[in-house]
Amino acid sequence: MAAANESLTARVSKLERRLGRNSGNSSMPSSSDTFGRPGEKTAPQSGRKRGRQPGAGETGLSISEHPDVTEDHVPAACTGCRSALGQGD
């Protein structure tokens, strides 16, 4: 009975060492991880669904089909080479 107990104790300690080793804390490649790495903990959920919440209101400014004024914003020079941009050259 004592020999069996000693044998089982040695086996348990060997298995515990194997469980403790993975590619993150030894020089083993990740493909040899037999028991898998511990999963990452996720942030606790807030209880809200994703996206726009009910009662949040409209999305903001709407696009008008017939605007009052239209403005063109054209740069005076090229942003890459800083040379002047001609009108229709």
Image (cartoon, rainbow, N blue to C red):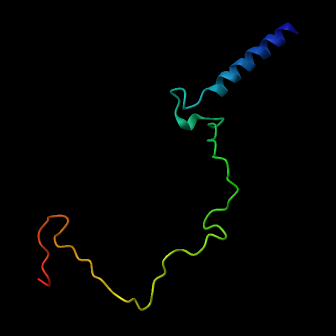
Rendered location of residue 43, percent (x, y): 63, 46
Residue at 23%, 77% (x, y): give it.
Answer: 74
| Quadrant containing the N terminus in the rendered view | top right
Residue at the farthest front position? 68
Residue at the farthest right position? 1
Position of residue 26 relative to residue 62, above or below, is: above
Camera-nearest residue between 63 and 37: 63
Q: In this view, does 60 lie to the left or right of 40?
A: left
- Quadrant in the picture for residue 84: bottom left
Residue at the farthest top position? 2
- Quadrant in the picture for residue 87: bottom left
Residue at the farthest bottom position? 66
Position of residue 11 relative to residue 51, above or below, is: above
Camera-nearest residue between 9 and 62: 62
Residue at 17%, 73% (x, y): give it.
Answer: 76
- Quadrant in the picture for residue 66: bottom left
